């Protein structure tokens, strides 16, 4: 039968559920993120502090090793909120390095190849597209933030001769909440900047600049004006204070330099809102043709 003699009809079969369409984007996003050997290398490098901390917990809970290493200083190997604050900070900043590599791979390629009109012509919305990319970033960053930190908490709970877990449960809650806040902030920031800059290498540098350049400006403002409010531009300081309060660790800042929790929450929400506005402006199902 010739093509012109065929009668075409609309598809009336079974449609896939909406959530499975997002799962397709997540699957391909994860495949794109792990397609590079650099991603694997960064992941291995990011897990080194975890293994070092694992050995430290083993030594603390081994009476023979503790007697040989401590030598009268019983606080040198204490496993407490300060210990978990250090490991959480280390893993979260290593997650920034990992994000700067994988986030541009998820969005910059789609923009530089003009693939968004094709992708959004399928039965997926802009929200589904961004949700799939967000979940892919969330899954990768979780492997180097709250997952290893919580594994260390569980290992300490198992190894300790005392009922350690129940007495220190706020530490576990603080680890999860603090890491999730950081992952959400990094995911919004990485996707927004990657959508604004089409070139992957430039996007990677822009992510680092967006974190550390305002931090330097905020430090200069605080030093020149003699005020603590310039630290609201310093993301490392804000996150360190937030993690310290969530875990109940000793204060890392002087009392006159501590920022109110409401101010930290407002600034983090403002950054996320700005990133959402950038994504809303950049992720469009259109293509500009110049003739």
Image (spheres, grey):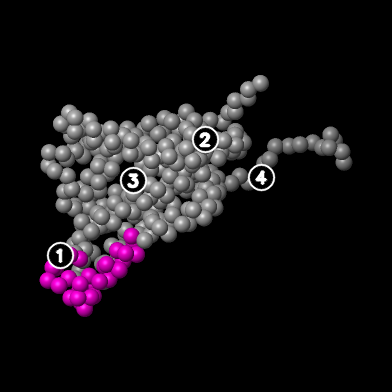
Look at the picture and state if 132 lies above or below 86. above
Q: SS class of the residue under badge 3?
A: helix
Spatial distance from mark 1 to mark 4, Cα to Cα?
A: 67 Å
Q: Which mark is residue 198?
A: 2
Quadrant where the image shows the C terminus: top right
Nearest-to-viewer mark from 2 and 3: 2
Whichever of callouts 1 and 3 sits on the residue coming sooner in the sequence is: 1
- Labels 2 and 1 touching (C-beta < 8 A): no
User: Residue 51 in magenta?
Assistant: yes
Look at the picture and state if 49 lies above or below 224. below
Quadrant where the image shows the N terminus: top right
Magenta-drawn stretch, dominant element (helix, strand or loop) = helix
- Labels 4 and 2 touching (C-beta < 8 A): no
Question: Magenta segment range?
Answer: 49-77
Pointer 1 residue: 75
Pointer 4 residue: 13
Residue at image x 49%, y 53%? 38
Pointer 3 residue: 182
User: Residue 111 in magenta?
Assistant: no
Point out the residue furthest to the top here. 291
Identify which residue, 259 or 175, lies in the foreground: 259
Identify which residue, 273 or 101, lies in the foreground: 101
Spatial distance from mark 2 to mark 1, Cα to Cα?
A: 50 Å
Whichever of callouts 2 and 3 sits on the residue coming sooner in the sequence is: 3
Spatial distance from mark 1 to mark 3, Cα to Cα?
A: 30 Å
Residue at image x 36%, y 51%? 94
Q: Position of residue 86 (x, y in %)?
A: 25, 55
């Amino acid at each position: 039968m010739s093509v012109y003699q065929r009668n075409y009809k609309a598809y009336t079969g079974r449609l896939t559920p909406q959530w499975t369409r997002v799962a397709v984007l997540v699957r391909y996003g994860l495949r794109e993120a792990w397609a590079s050997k650099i991603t694997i290398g960064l992941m291995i490098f990011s897990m080194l502090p975890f293994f070092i901390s694992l050995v430290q917990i083993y030594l603390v809970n081994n009476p023979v090793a503790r007697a040989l290493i401590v030598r009268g200083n019983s606080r040198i190997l204490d496993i407490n909120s300060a210990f978990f604050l250090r490991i959480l900070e280390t893993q979260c900043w290593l997650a920034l390095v990992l994000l700067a590599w994988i986030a541009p791979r998820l969005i910059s390629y789609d923009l530089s190849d003009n693939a968004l009109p094709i992708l959004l012509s399928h039965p997926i919305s802009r929200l589904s597209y961004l949700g799939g990319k967000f979940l892919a970033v969330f899954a990768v960053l979780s492997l180097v933030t709250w997952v290893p930190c919580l594994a260390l908490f569980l290992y300490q709970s198992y190894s300790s001769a005392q009922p350690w877990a129940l007495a220190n449960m706020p530490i576990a809650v603080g680890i999860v909440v603090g890491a999730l806040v950081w992952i959400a902030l990094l995911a919004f920031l990485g996707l927004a900047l990657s959508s604004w800059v089409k070139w992957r290498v430039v996007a990677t540098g822009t992510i680092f600049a967006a974190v550390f350049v305002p931090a330097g400006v905020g430090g200069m403002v605080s030093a020149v004006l003699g005020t603590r409010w310039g630290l609201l531009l310093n993301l490392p300081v804000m996150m360190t204070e937030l993690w310290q309060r969530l875990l109940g660790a000793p204060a890392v800042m002087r009392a006159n330099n501590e920022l109110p929790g409401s101010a930290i929450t407002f600034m983090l929400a403002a950054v996320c809102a700005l990133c959402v506005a950038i994504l809303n402006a950049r992720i469009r199902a259109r293509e500009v043709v110049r003739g």
